[in-house]
Image: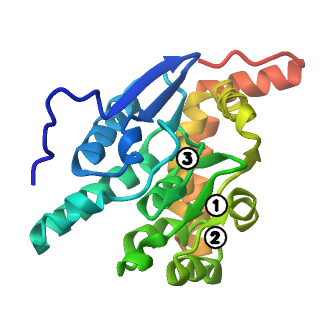
Amino acid sequence: MNAPIEAGLAPYVLTDVRDRVCTITMNRADRFNALSTSMIAALDEALEAIGRDGSVRVIVLAGAGRAFCAGHDLTEMRAHIDEAWQRTLFDRCTAMMTRMTQLPQPVIARVQGPAAAAGCQLVSMCDLAVAADHAKFGLSGINAGIFCTTPSVGVARNVPRKRAMELLLTGELIDAHTASAWGLVNRVVPAGELDAAVDALAQSIARKSGAAVAMGKRAFYAQVEQTMASAYEIAGRTMACNMLDPDAAEGIDAFLAKRPPKFR
């Protein structure tokens, strides 16, 4: 399955790098940034390229227009009633979603509007999320006769099991404060303060050792699904390697000398 090329349209995603932070913006406001095959391909390509850029310390994922992401493109999906096509779509979407957890840089979702179905999944697969107070979240596929099975994988790793099942079975949207209380987002702020809040969080991370953050993120996802014994094995091995990194030596020396660290 090849992603269709739509001649004459603006890019599916826009990227902007400032102060070691790269913002990736889904750029189909008229389609509520739906995850069509083209959008998935564009996001995956952008994430892969930024992951190789050592000058970028943090990635912000944003959506243009009123919605963050409305989920999969149902019009496109309905036009391809073919199991092989559908399976390829979900395989490619899964690869893009999991890539975010595999990148060395933390990914922050900037949620300015509704995040539904696979859009909610997208938020759940980001490392962190900041939402405007009017944003809505939900696994709404059941309303169209589609159980949000793939979105449930990420969401159920963010919120308690019964909360996930409530979202899956009712298809109802929850508000940003409820999403925060359930663990889907980190912070909720007034819409006018969203960019400042995202930037403050991003810069707080960007000032840290990039090597330590990358190493720690990789270890976090490696251990979080393991048994306690296996998790500690992974964590201990990573800590030992971290201690041998020059940034760790600089950080400790700076702490002991009561001065700001100068990380690479």
Residue type, label 2? Val
Please name which of the two marks, 1 or 3, marks the residue nearer to the observer.
Answer: 1
- Seen in the picture, residue 7 relative to 191 is either above or below; the reply is above
Residue 104, placed above or below residue 246: below
| Gap in angstroms between the C-alphas marked 1 and 3 | 18 Å
The percent position of residue 122, horizontal first and vertical second, equals 46, 54
Question: Going from the N terminus, do you reach mark 1 or mark 2 first?
Answer: 2
Q: Position of residue 186 (x, y in %)?
A: 71, 51
Is residue 54 visible from the viewing direction of this image?
no
Q: Position of residue 54 (x, y in %)?
A: 45, 23
Query: Compared with residue 250, is residue 80 higher up or lower down, i.e. above or below?
Result: below
Question: Is the C-beta separation of discs 1 and 2 under 8 Å?
Answer: yes
Q: Which residue is mark 1?
A: 184
What residue is pinned by disc 3? 217
- Answer with left or right where residue 13 lies relative to residue 57: left
Q: Disc 2 designates what residue?
A: 159
Of mark 2 and mark 3, the one earlier in the sequence is 2
Characterize the local packing of mark 3: few (<14), some (14-19) or many (20 or more) Cα atoms within 10 angstroms: some
In the image, what residue type sits under mark 1?
Leu
Residue found 69% across the figure and 35% down from its top:
194
The type of residue carrying mark 3 is Lys
Q: Residues within 10 Å of mark 1 (few under 14, many from 20)?
A: many
The structure residue drawn at horizontal position 74% and vertical position 48%, both measured from the top left corner, is: 188
Disc 1/disc 2 C-alpha distance (Å): 6 Å
Q: Which residue is nearer to you in this view: 124 or 208?
A: 124
Dividing the image into 4 quarters, which one contains the C terminus? top right
Neighbor class of circle 2 (other Cα within 10 Å; few <14, some 14-19, many 20+) is: some
